[in-house]
Image: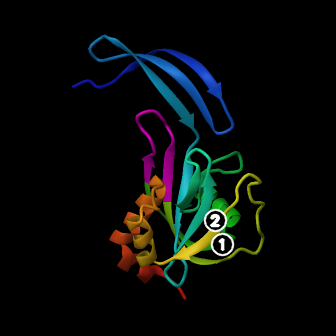
Amino acid sequence: MNFEEKVIKHEPKFNGHIIDVEVQTVELPNGQTAVRDIVHHVPAVAVLAITPDNKALIMQQWRTALQKVTYEVPAGKLDARDTNPLHAVVRELNEETRMQAGHIEEISSFYLASGYSDELMHLYLATDLTPVADELPQDFDETLNVQAYSLDELAKLNEAGKLDDSKTQIAYWYWQANAARVKGMLHG
């Protein structure tokens, strides 16, 4: 079965600091046309950073779109400083948590909202954490509170509906499913 929709027209609507928006007219497989609102976003990274005492580093921060404080794993978009997602992971860990990892591995990559956005998130596991020697500047427009949470503490936050960020949910469920393996990787 053919699922491909062919773009026959695209109209840029907005070019912003983080996203670009366009309206696409597409030809459906059956020959009819439809309109699609598309948000373009650069790739991003997120990190399940586990401390030597088996706790995850979680950021609390205000999210204006939601009008509330969220609990999130460290994350950020790739930018001109990054040669690849792994480089962005190292940079974001430094900027947001002031930590570096002795071991980093990719967990998964996934689209955050495939119905309307092309944002690709790369999720990594980072262990063997130690403080950085040289701190990178933090983003001027972020106010972050870093806390370490055990898996049980995160389970309670999840049950209370406070882990409603998608990348953090995926990281949490990964940790739940792989708790013994992750604990076995810890140094300290």
Up-down relation of residue 140 to residue 32 (above or below): below
Percent of width and height locating residue 137 = 78, 60
* Mark 1 touches mark 2? (CB < 8 Å): yes
* Quadrant housing residue 35: top left
Residue 84 percent across, percent down from the top left: 60, 51
Quarter holding residue 29? top left
The residue under label 2 is 93
Is residue 64 among the parts visible in the rendering?
A: yes
Which color scheme did the rendering employ for the protein?
Answer: rainbow
For residue 99, the mark is 1
Residue 19 in the image: state x and y as whole percent: 61, 35
Lower position in the chain sequence, tag 1 or tag 2: 2
Residue at x-position 52% and y-position 74%: 50
Who's the residue at 43% across and 48% down the image?
110
Q: At 75% across and 59% down in the image, what residue appears?
A: 138
Q: Is residue 63 above or below residue 73?
A: above
- Left or right side of 128 for 150: left
Quarter of the image that includes the C terminus: bottom right
Work out which quarter of the rendered image holds the N terminus and state it: top left
- 116 drawn magenta: yes
Q: Is residue 85 visible?
A: no
Q: Secondary structure at mark 1?
A: strand
Q: Amino acid at mark 2?
A: Leu
Q: Which residues are magenta?
A: 109-123
The 10 Å Cα crowd at callout 2, few under 14, some 14 to 19, many 20 or more, is many
The residues bearing labels 1 and 2 have C-alpha atoms spaced at a distance of 6 Å
Q: Is residue 41 above or below residue 101?
A: above
Kind of element beneath mark 2: helix
Q: Residue furthest bottom?
A: 188
Question: Dot 1, crowdedness within 10 Å: few (<14), some or many (≥20)?
Answer: many
Q: Is residue 114 magenta?
A: yes
- Which residue is at 54% across, 61% downward? 72
